[in-house]
Image (cartoon, rainbow, N blue to C red):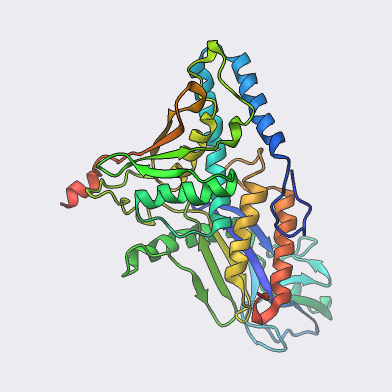
Amino acid sequence: MAIFSVYVVNKAGGLIYQLDHCAPRADTEKTFSFPLDLVLRPHDERVVVAFGQRDGIRVGHAVLAINGAEVNGRLTADGQDVLQFLGNPANYPVSIRFGRHRLSSNEKLMLASMFHSLFAIGSQLSPEVGSSGIEMLETDTFKLHCFQTLTGTAAAAAPGAPEPGLADASVLAAPGIKFMVLADPRQAGIDALLRKIYEIYSDFALKNPFYSLEMPIRCELFDQNLKLALEVAEKAGPFGPGS
Amino acid sequence: MSRPPGRKQENHKISRELFVLTYGALVAQLCKDYEKDEDVNTCLDRMGYGIGIRLIDDFLARSAVKKCRSYSETADMIAQVAFKMYLGVTPSVSCSSAAGNEFSLILDKNPLVDFVEELPAERASLCYCNLLCGVIRGALEMVHLAAEVTFLQDRLKGDAVTEIGITFLRKAEDRKHKRNK
């Protein structure tokens, strides 16, 4: 049972906080002799496995380290091209570590903004009025839970209503802060965890007089308390926290 | 007043008198800094606004209330839940306009003025608790309800009760909607 990561997205869609609590899968390190029976190919800035899945090394895994030294994109630690290095029989036997590529902070920013947009589209597509947006996204390896607060800086003018009810500000015009938690599919109690994260945010981020709204959260107390809350939620396991 | 990590959430009781004294010291210092009462009132309102935009998230996180569907529900929520949670008093709500967007909260007990008997003669138009108006205005703005909040009556100025008036502002017709029609 694990909680993989926490993301906090501000009202404009920018990522203001991110925590990787634990990695979903361990890396695999193996020693190989020439010739390499995996097919590697370059992809973006890294070298990934294209074919030859075996022993925990899956297609799509990236080369993370060679002989213990972390690779730098497509170059080894000492500057050689990885594919050239692995094509040279003189370098064998070689120990290569494969694993899922860790997202860079820029990629995380982009993905958070994309999710923000999808969330907005989701609430608009909803057949029900006043949808709360995407609350959960489930895959076979993880579940993404999202909670959006009711607050948000006043956006475009809401239409005037003849009756003394509230003008129906659609979610699009009124986004709040989003708290997203990626966790193991069997992990329970994430709803309570999201509420707890909201409380921790309102305590240690908002009440900090030197924290400006909508800016990246750099509060030590927020970090500490968030990690504690995650540990409590994880210990509770698949049955959720006790009443 | 940071809590050590791991401590269960509990109502951190500090001396109420310390809080009232702190507020009093704040107003007194502002009176020294500004000559005109309007400036002091504006300053208090601005400070309250800064508190309100942050306090609203704390309120929503702790009270877990659902979205209010009407102005009167909002006014009731402010009086019965928010005031109770933060100041320990429950003002009574009354709707004072036919249009249904003006409400007044009547406070018979106001903890902030525990030690104040009356305003000094040269500060006759000072709104002592104007911070509260700013807090309510800031909090409402963060949930997309523009409102004007003022003191309609003030015990410190000789009125019978302390009354806060909340007027929800209705926005002008959205141009986009006009085009759709």
| Residue reaching furthest to the front | B160
User: Which quarter of the figure has residue B86?
Assistant: top right
Residue A221 versus residue A80: which sits nearer the camera?
Answer: A221
Q: Residue A171 location in percent, x, y?
A: 39, 57
Residue B140 versus residue B152: which sits nearer the camera?
Answer: B152
State left or right for residue B53 relative to residue A27: left
Residue A104 in view, yes or no: yes
Q: Residue at x 53, y 61 (%)?
A: A111
Q: In this view, does B6 lie above or below B173?
A: below
Q: Residue A59 location in percent, x, y?
A: 62, 81
User: Which quarter of the figure has residue A133?
Assistant: bottom left
User: Which quarter of the figure has residue A194?
Assistant: bottom right
Count of numbered circles on the image: 0
Q: Residue A67 location in percent, x, y?
A: 83, 72
Q: Is residue B33 above or below residue A44?
A: above
Q: Looking at the rendering, in which quadrant would you find the N terminus of chain A?
A: bottom right
Q: Which residue is drawn at 74% across and 46% down?
A: B2
Q: Residue at x 68, y 35 (%)?
A: B19
State left or right for residue A17 relative to residue B60: right
Q: Looking at the rendering, in which quadrant would you find the C terminus of chain A?
A: bottom right
Q: Which residue is drawn at 28% across and 39% down?
A: B97
